[in-house]
Image (tube, helix red, strand yellow):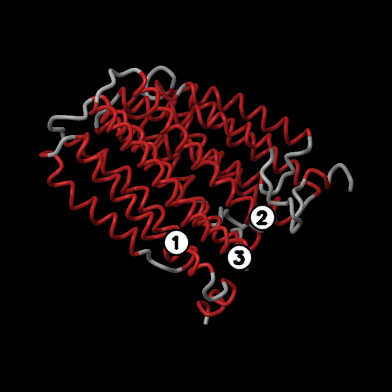
């Protein structure tokens, strides 16, 4: 194998979908980023803070998932790719550190770090692909063009004042989130069909699963740190147990149900790029957002488990599990073509609770949300194996195209 060919991940071998240690090391930056997101929302616990949290969460997820796509083609065991990831880690650390003040004095630092991360990584990939697949290289040139366009708005927002900054950054995210659904279309160059995105399905599934682990780990970290700093009594102990069980139920729902089905279908798909784009790239944002909100809710409940709560606290306690179930539901709909009754039922129960939530204590509302997640996890587990053993995915796709 030549040194140039060694830069590319092999396809079809037993180890081709294996996640490397340098990728796991790279992910540590995003443990910090997720922690920064939840803490910054707690410090700015307002509706405006919620909007900012949503925007920054979308940015953090987007920069990570685009890197996961790149690493699906590049070989992390080569030094040139490793050095790229290490460089991105430094930039990502600057980006993550600037999150709490991103709409204040650190906005320009966040914008420059984000743009350098996205544009620099993509430009490097284009250079690496100069002796690789021509179609894939053209695809990344298209991606580079879109990210350069959005980068103008990111940096423009960094220079702007707070209100205009939000507008600039919303435009930038809109450009980036619309681009994949358009196949990164460019005048004359056209768009990239999903068949060009010949992803290694096992690798993509494992990478996204590891990010969910990162988010859940941050949730447990926040819960444990908050509990350790409180005076221990029956109320805080029960709140701590409820938070822990909620995290366990989230883990069970994703890894025992959703990820298992997704891994099976993408590994046997005739067009894994389509599944990776829709199911992994987009829907997992809802999962991450739900986990971050649940971590914030756990800290709020631990701080004040008894007494009536305001609407904002109630909304966060219920919105986290709802977003999480919604993301799982959309994922199964895209991947397997089914609408999961357990997920729908859980979302409905949480939505019905909201009008009555202000009359409940934070602990009681959190407890009901946790029980709902546990019921969904147990109920959903009953059909997972059966779903993976039904009509083969390739046959499903041929049937759907008739």
Residue 144 in the image, given as x and y percentages of width and height: 61, 43
Quick one: label 3, few (<14), some, or many (20+) residues within 10 Å? some
Element type at mark 2: loop
Residue 24 position by quadrant: top right
Q: Which residue is the site of mark 3?
A: 271
Q: Nearer the viewer, residue 90 or 108?
A: 90
Residue 124 in the image, given as x and y percentages of width and height: 70, 37
**Left of 203 or right of it: where is 241?**
left
Contact check, label 3 and label 2, Cβ < 8 Å: no
Estimate the spatial distance between the alpha carbons at disc 3 and disc 1, rounded to whole Å: 16 Å
Q: Nearer the viewer, residue 63 or 173?
A: 63
Ranked by sequence position, the earlier of labels 2 and 1 is 2
Ranked by sequence position, the earlier of labels 3 and 2 is 2
Q: Which residue is the site of mark 2?
A: 200
Element type at mark 3: loop
Residue 242 position by quadrant: top left
Quick one: label 2, few (<14), some, or many (20+) residues within 10 Å? many
Q: Which residue is the site of mark 1?
A: 332
Mark 3 or 2: the one toward you: 2
Quick one: label 1, few (<14), some, or many (20+) residues within 10 Å? many
Q: 26 above or below 374?
A: above
Residue placed furthest toward the right: 2
Estimate the spatial distance between the alpha carbons at disc 2 and disc 1, rounded to whole Å: 19 Å
Name the residue: 67% across, 38% down.
123
Ranked by sequence position, the earlier of labels 3 and 1 is 3
């Amino acid at each position: 194998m030549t040194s140039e060919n060694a830069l590319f991940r092999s396809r079809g071998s037993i180890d081709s979908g294996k996640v490397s240690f340098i990728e796991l090391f790279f992910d540590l930056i995003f443990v910090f980023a997720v922690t920064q997101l939840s803490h910054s929302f707690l410090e700015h616990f307002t509706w405006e803070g919620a909007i900012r949290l949503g925007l920054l969460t979308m940015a953090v997820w987007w920069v990570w998932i685009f890197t996961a796509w790149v690493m699906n083609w590049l070989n992390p065991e080569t030094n040139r790719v490793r050095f790229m990831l290490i460089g991105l880690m430094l930039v990502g650390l600057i980006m993550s550190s600037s999150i709490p003040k991103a709409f204040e004095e650190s906005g320009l630092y966040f914008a420059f770090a984000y743009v350098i991360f996205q544009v620099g990584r993509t430009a490097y990939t284009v250079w690496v692909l100069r002796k690789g697949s021509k179609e894939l290289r053209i695809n990344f040139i298209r991606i580079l063009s879109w990210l350069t366009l959005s980068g103008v708005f990111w940096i423009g927002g960094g220079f702007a004042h707070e209100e205009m900054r939000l507008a600039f950054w919303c435009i930038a995210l809109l450009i980036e989130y619309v681009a994949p659904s358009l196949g990164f279309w460019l005048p004359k160059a056209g768009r990239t069909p999903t068949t060009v995105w010949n992803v290694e399905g096992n690798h993509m599934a494992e990478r996204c699963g590891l990010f969910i682990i990162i988010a859940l780990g941050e949730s447990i970290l926040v819960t444990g740190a908050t509990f350790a700093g409180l005076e221990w009594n029956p109320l805080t102990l029960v709140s701590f147990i409820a938070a822990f069980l909620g995290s366990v139920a989230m883990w069970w729902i994703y890894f025992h149900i959703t990820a298992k089905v997704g891994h099976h279908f993408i590994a046997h798909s005739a067009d894994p790029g389509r599944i990776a784009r829709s199911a992994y790239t987009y829907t997992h944002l809802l999962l991450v957002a739900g986990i971050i909100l649940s971590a914030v809710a756990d800290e709020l409940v631990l701080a004040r488990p008894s007494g009536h709560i305001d609407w904002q606290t109630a909304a966060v306690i219920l919105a986290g599990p709802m977003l999480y179930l919604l993301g799982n539901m959309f994922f199964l709909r895209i991947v397997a073509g089914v609408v999961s009754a357990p997920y729908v039922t859980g979302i409905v129960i949480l939505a019905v609770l909201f009008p009555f939530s202000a009359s409940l204590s934070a602990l009681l509302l959190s407890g009901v949300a946790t029980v709902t997640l546990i019921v969904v996890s147990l109920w959903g587990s009953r059909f997972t194996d059966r779903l993976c053993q039904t009509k083969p995915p390739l046959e499903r796709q041929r049937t759907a195209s008739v």
